[in-house]
Every structure is written in C-alpha cells, then in structure tokens.
Amino acid sequence: MARQITVLPPPAPLPDMLYVETDGTGVPVRPSETEGRQGKSEDGKAGTREVKLARLFTVSRLDDDGRPVMDAGSSTHVATFDGKDALAGLVEAEYLRRGGEHHRQVVALGDGTGIRSGPWPGTSTPGHPHHRHLPRPRAPARPGRPPGVHHA
C-alpha cells in the first residue's frame, strides 16, 4: 500500500508570506571525504565539498520603508551534501511540516544554483514579475545589530 501524506491545517493563523531561501557553498572537509573528487587547486585536489542549504522563514509585516521584515524566531533550516534534488525533497518536507500550503504567498530566494521554486503552487522567484517589487526581507531588530541591516 502506498504511503499518503495528509496536510492538516495549522492550529493558529499563519503569517501572510513564507520565504524559502536556498544556496550552496563549499565547506572544508577531511581529505578522506574528497577522494576521487576533482578540485580547483593547482594540484587538482579538492579541499571542500558543496553543501546545499535552505532556510524557511515567515514575514508578517513591512517596515516604515515598505520592506518585508522577517518574523523573529521563524527560521528553520535544512542542509545536505547530496545535491539540489535531495535539498528539494528536504525543503518540500519542511514546507509541508510548516503548513506551507496555507500561506497566501511563497517566495523563493536563490542564485539559480539551487532550487528556485518548489513543487508548491503560487511560488514567486526574484525574476518573477510578481516578485520584482519585493526586496530581501529585513531581520528583526536584535541587540548589537544596527537598525536596517538586512539578514543574509
């Protein structure tokens, strides 16, 4: 029998927008973890492996300049060394866990090397005509952070 996932409605009202931010970066690893991998150094040895990362967070309000402000404590993260397809599966699972189907709008932020949009309907991307007016979200104010600094 095939497994079926039923998405239940969230217990409380959800923020208006869910952002999905993806990226990849090289992280240093032990030489044994790069055996057989081509590197960028002069000797051709790899010293890093690429990890794919995603952060999901919500936005419920705009600041005085009309820019979205990230909701404090709303970030969750997923990561994998297994490539963008594996990351897509992790992001989809986290999206469903967070009640993503119940947000009015989902916005995908990325540089095009990861997953820019997911298997969910209504996703906007930075190049999407409906998303161009939306700047990167601002982080909530935290002690030690100057006002107006964007969270990256």
Image (cartoon, helix red, strand yellow):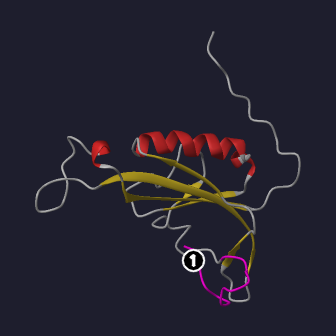
How crowded pointer 1 is (Cα within 10 Å; few <14, some 14-19, many 20+) is rated as few
Residue drawn at point x = 52 percent, y = 39 percent: 89
The secondary element bearing badge 1 is classed as loop
- Where is residue 63 shown, x and y percent of the image? 73, 83
| Magenta region, residue range | 139-152
Residue drawn at point x = 20 percent, y = 40 percent: 36
- Where is residue 123 shown, x and y percent of the image? 57, 54
Depicted 147 relative to depicted 11: above or below: below
Out of 104 and 58, give the one closest to the viewer: 58
Left or right of 65: which side holds 92?
left
Left or right of 99: which side holds 45?
left
**Quarter of the image holding residue 75?**
bottom right
Q: Does the magenta stretch include residue 144?
A: yes
Left or right of 107: which side holds 46?
left
Out of 139 and 51, give the one closest to the viewer: 51
Residue drawn at point x = 64 percent, y = 45 percent: 94
Left or right of 48: which side holds 109?
right
Q: Mark 1 is on which residue type?
A: Pro
- Where is residue 58 shown, x and y percent of the image? 70, 62
Depicted 65 relative to depicted 24: above or below: below
Q: Residue at label 1?
A: 135
**Please, what is the dominant secondary structure of the magenta stretch?**
loop
Query: If the image is split into quadrants, where does the C terminus sit?
Result: bottom right
Depicted 17 relative to depicted 136: above or below: above
Depicted 137 relative to depicted 116: above or below: below
Query: If the image is split into quadrants, where does the N terminus sit?
Result: top right
| Residue farthest along the top direction in this orientation | 1
**Quarter of the image holding residue 137?**
bottom right
Q: Does the magenta stretch include residue 2?
A: no
Residue drawn at point x = 20 percent, y = 54 percent: 39
